[in-house]
């Protein structure tokens, strides 16, 4: 139990700092139904588990041994992350027009206004196959296309793994994986529960802030890629 709790606390320390994963999960919790937001969180959890397991068993060492692999991930990851960030920062005009039309329609009756404030009118009730595939792709990118996060995770988790015996490994890494489930599911439930208190305009501003930060992450990856190439 002591090793499990140690893994749990280390897992929370590894996940909690605000990063692309957290911004993606928070944005989903603000703009989607609880069901869809939880599906998104679960997908992120699965990718995060795969990352922490890989870091625990030393995938970062592989990148350090083969610099060309890190360079590829930096370049490809930077481009995709920038695209995701700009998609949030600069929504398509068509989507914006639909949002304006929805707001205008909502203002026609008090019931519609209440529904708009609650956020249910603007949230798709079913994610759909295309939405699910987009979510899986984005969750993969915000988790795996950041080589610095992989190397840092290896330094934190992989170094600790070297001090554990075979019998001690299982409870420790189980604690780390539990932290991933607790954090992302907890953040989703809390943010989604209070999302109705935000007006559509505030949610739009938060959406753009998330997009701006994610774009900066992508730009940083591209800068690191350019430095690695040069």
Image (cartoon, grey):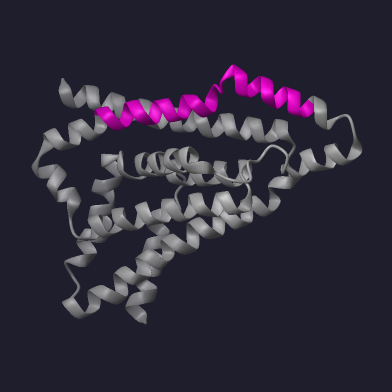
Check the image and report above or below for 202 versus 90.
below
- Residue 17 x/y as whole percent: 44, 49
Task: Decide which of 164, 104 is in the foreground and name it.
Answer: 104
Say which quarter of the image contains residue 146: top left
Left or right relative to 46: residue 127 = right
**Screen quadrant of the C terminus:** top left
Q: Is residue 63 magenta?
A: no
- Kindly tell me whether residue 201 is visible in this rendering: yes
- Residue 219 x/y as whole percent: 36, 25
Dominant secondary structure (helix, strand or loop) of the stretch shown in magenta: helix
Q: Residue furthest left?
A: 65
Residue at position x 64%, y 22% in the image: 96
Residue at position x 27%, y 29% in the image: 76
Task: Decide which of 114, 124 is in the foreground and name it.
Answer: 124
Q: Which residues are magenta?
A: 75-103
Residue at position x 37%, y 70% in the image: 175
Check the image and report above or below for 67 versus 93.
below
**Screen quadrant of the N terminus:** bottom left
Say which quarter of the image contains residue 124: top right
- Residue 85 x/y as whole percent: 46, 29
Say which quarter of the image contains residue 92: top right
- Kindly tell me whether residue 23 is visible in this rendering: no
Residue at position x 41%, y 25% in the image: 83
Question: Total marks drawn?
Answer: 0
Check the image and report above or below for 142 versus 182.
above
Q: Residue furthest front?
A: 129
- Residue 106 x/y as whole percent: 82, 32
Check the image and report above or below for 43 versus 74.
below
Left or right relative to 132: residue 36 = right
């Amino acid at each position: 139990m002591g090793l499990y709790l140690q893994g749990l606390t280390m897992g929370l320390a590894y996940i909690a700092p605000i990063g692309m994963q957290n911004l993606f999960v928070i944005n989903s919790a603000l703009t989607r139904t609880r069901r869809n937001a939880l599906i998104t969180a679960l997908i992120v959890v699965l990718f995060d588990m795969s990352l922490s397991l890989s870091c625990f068993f030393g995938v970062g060492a592989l990148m350090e041994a083969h610099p060309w692999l890190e360079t590829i991930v930096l370049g490809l990851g930077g481009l995709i992350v920038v695209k995701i960030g700009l998609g949030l920062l600069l929504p398509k005009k068509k989507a914006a027009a639909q949002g304006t039309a929805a707001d205008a329609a909502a203002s026609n009756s008090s019931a519609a206004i209440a529904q708009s404030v609650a956020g249910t009118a603007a949230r798709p009730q079913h994610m759909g196959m295309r939405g699910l595939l987009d979510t899986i792709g984005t969750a993969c990118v915000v988790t795996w296309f950041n080589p610095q996060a992989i190397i840092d995770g290896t330094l934190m988790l992989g170094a600790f793994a070297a001090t554990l015996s075979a019998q001690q490994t299982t409870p420790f890494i189980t604690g780390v994986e539990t932290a991933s489930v607790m954090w992302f599911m907890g953040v989703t439930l809390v943010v989604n529960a209070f999302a109705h208190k935000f007006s559509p305009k505030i949610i739009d501003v938060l959406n753009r802030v998330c997009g701006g930060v994610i774009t900066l992450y992508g730009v940083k990856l591209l800068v690191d890629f350019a430095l690695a190439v040069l």
